[in-house]
Image (cartoon, rainbow, N blue to C red):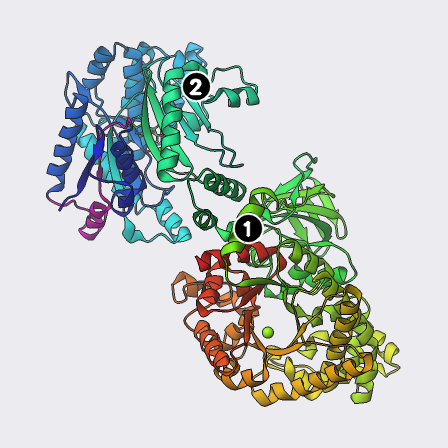
Amino acid sequence: TKWVYSFGDGKAEGQADMRNLLGGKGANLAEMSNLGLPVPPGFTISTEVCTYYYANGQTYPADLEGQVQAALDRVGAITGKTFGDSENPLLVSVRSGARASMPGMMDTVLNLGLNDVTVEAIARSSGDARFAYDSYRRFIQMYSDVVLGVDHGFFEDHLEEYKERKNYKLDTDLSAADWQVLVGKFKDTVQAELGRPFPQDPRDQLWGAIGAVFGSWMNQRANKYRELHGIPASWGTAVNVQAMVFGNLGETSATGVAFTRNPSTGAKELYGEFLINAQGEDVVAGIRTPQDITEAARIAAGSDRPSLERAMPQAYAEFIRICGLLEKHYRDVQDVEFTIERGKLWMLQTRNGKRTAKAALKIAVDLASEGVLTHEEAIGRIDPAALDQLLHPTIDPAAERKIIATGLPASPGAAGGEVVFDSDEAEQARAAGRRVILVRIETSPEDIHGMHASEGILTTRGGMTSHAAVVARGMGKPCVSGAGGLRVDYAAQTLTAGGVTLKKGDWITIDGGTGQVLVGEVKMLEPQLSGEFGTLMGWADGVRRMKVRANAETPRDARAARGFGAEGIGLCRTEHMFFEGERIVAVREMILADDEKGRRAALAKLLPMQRADFVELFSIMSGLPVTIRLLDPPLHEFLPHTDEEIAEVAAAMGADADKLKRRAAELHEFNPMLGFRGCRLAVAYPEIAEMQARAIFEAAVQAAKASGQPVIPEVMVPLVMTKPELDLVKERIVAMAEAVKKETGAALDYQVGTMIELPRAALRAGEIAESAEFFSFGTNDLTQTTLGISRDDAASFLGPYTAKAILPADPFVTIDAEGVGELVRLAAERGRKTRGSLKLGICGEHGGDPASIAFCESVGLDYVSCSPYRVPIARLAAAQAAL
Ligand code: ADP
Ligand code: MG
Ligand code: MG
């Protein structure tokens, strides 16, 4: 078996697409060699050796040693040096490199091959003893730390103490003799710590380092990282051994890192730093302040230390040329590492650069304009979920920030509001038109309504995957979680941090992008959706097949939805309108009434309010389709809880409070989600559906008259399980439409359809489509009812299901394509067979989830509907699904 792949001198045995075998770093070093770029020669020990190593009791294949030696000889031939030679020694670096870059893996060891003999040879051949001993001490330090497990603190202490004694400020102040003294101390430390000397045989050093790389694949840090990022342990890591080039060979040498474009803004400007007379990690280690690479950046930063452009113009020009070439070749922004040895540039690494969502957009659009990418490719480059970062208000960077605590940036966006500690209070405040931030030690499913009602959520406990974080991200609400520096006292209704105590009702602002918690109201910037965002979304709109609608009922949400490009409302939840202000009293009157007469009296109060809501909604959506769902939730959700609330309703009805209390108790349900809800309400109390239908149709007539544009409402019946059930409700709706037509003398066009959210309805879709003109898949309930998992209770037991891969993902986040998806597919087929023109959409939470949107495309749905803030995500995901 071939275990080792060489690169260097303008050619390589590997290439970029061999990432699985060579790891990212190795594959790209090979690719750069093939491109003829100046890459120090070396070789990659493949990931298959790692797999072999763990499958065979941590041993190597028998023929590995021979292959490594042969590859080492090739490197020697190219460089004209010999590994371990006492006159002209080859020094190498040993670098780990998995498929995906992985913190937690072994750190790189530089200058390997140095010992008491070779260091002298290096001093002679370079003519720079300071350099030789600086390299040697670095090697002992790194190797001891990374391979031998001797804490680097020991070495740093020696160095600090020595510098202090000699009155040196910088490492570069030390002379050859100084470093020689320190090398002695370092070796003594190793002897003292390990009871054996620092290894002098270069071959031992090399195999020690190789073993350490493979060993690090299974260390605790790496295992944890893989677990968090879903990287399989079977992938293994590669090891790269590469000839050293030296950035610490005096003033004409340097080392640096750069992005070919600005990774936070995406601007087309080289972005990077370098250090003269330095090696490896010095640039990022922060021991010395690095210098700017370009003159423009130096001027912008107001630095008086020369840029690379000025200090080493030739190497700089070559570097710029190579950066341009790499960008073209990889067709993406590159994150590169380089070293300059006595004026000569060497490339040590390249990879696609990580970037913010904002930069990703700009880069994709720019690369397309430059002709590097097609529009389709540019669309494919953006992670739809990452758009979330851009769709929320942010704190004005110029605003003063009074930060009292910092937690985790759990869900992006900034928000301000009054502090409330209780979800019910949050809901009441929202209903009264106030803005609140829900502050909890942690949240549970019982807080869902409070989270919905809040502008943002702040918790003192829990991580990035805590309930608060996950739910907030799903809702598109800003969230700071795990702000451990904050103390919440529920009893006192206070919040204390940084010596400041806030009471309920005090204003705070949270920044879910940084995790900051601020006192008071802070100036916000609305999201900027023009520029590249608009361009890319335009391209996406051009290729997608499915329409994107929004779930919205308030004017505020409907406007936001249109601003984000929604093409209609896919779900208007009328019950949300019932909670607004004083209406709840009338709603309670209706529920608690003894008979139809009492209900009709209460409904008469609600009719004008509901009609006015719909008029406004229709006018905001000016001609776009609006799907309105009849009352859906269990009646029980509207019941008065406190004596005070009961007294209020009793007064409004002129009824006896005790009697009302008894009636409320009667309406108690054991399992409300499978109880008296959905169209069951309309079946039992048709007058509720009638009032809603009247409000919809009268509003449609009124809005059409006002705008001169036709309004075609889509009336949706929830939780249908049989055709006769739908027929019964539909009959009432149709009769009401006829009545309104007659009363107003206006033409009226409308559709009646149903939600498919029960397995039975999906199975019987063929006959239900005889009566329904459209289906909207309510996949939240369809998931609950198909899996038999209560969404609000799932948090406590679903964790292990995804962790143990029993389920591939949380089925409430990403649709269970095999189970729930099969029902959707089947219902779509059966429904369309009955009625070719049947309109199909999805309105569950899944409508805003990219993976679920891809599923919807595969089933051929006509549209997806999601929360307003997720509309752009859905537009992009729908485009990607169509490509
Ligand atoms: P990481 O994956 O942590 O970036 P690398 O293997 O890229 O680790 O090594 C870190 C740094 O060490 C490189 O950026 C480079 O500066 C230096 N380095 C690695 N190999 C060599 C080499 N052969 N010659 C000179 N410097 C090297
Ligand atoms: Mg690197
Ligand atoms: Mg439902």
Q: Quadrant of the C terminus?
A: bottom left
Q: Nearer the viewer, residue 808 or 660?
A: 808
Q: Is residue 758 above or below residue 146?
A: below
Disc 2 crowd, CA 10 A, few/some/many (<14, 14-19, 20+)? many
Horizontal relation, residue 832 to residue 692: left or right: left
Horizontal relation, residue 105 to residue 840: left or right: left
Which residue shows up at 19% across the image and 18% down it?
A: 118
Q: Nearer the viewer, residue 351 or 666?
A: 351
Which residue shows up at 58% across the image and 45% down it?
A: 513
Amino acid of disc 1: Met
Q: Nearer the viewer, residue 36 or 711?
A: 711
Q: Secondary structure at mark 2?
A: helix
Label number found at residue 345: none
Q: Position of residue 612 (x, y in %)?
A: 80, 68
* Res. 42 image quadrant: top left
Res. 696 in view: yes
**Which residue lies under the disc numbered 1?**
537
Alpha carbon of mark 2 to alpha carbon of mark 1: how far? 38 Å
Q: Position of residue 611 (x, y in %)?
A: 78, 72
Q: Which residues are magenta?
A: 38-62
Q: Is residue 583 above or below residue 224?
A: below
* Res. 858 image quadrant: bottom left
**Which residue lies under the disc numbered 2?**
308
Any magenta on residue 47? yes
Res. 201 in view: no
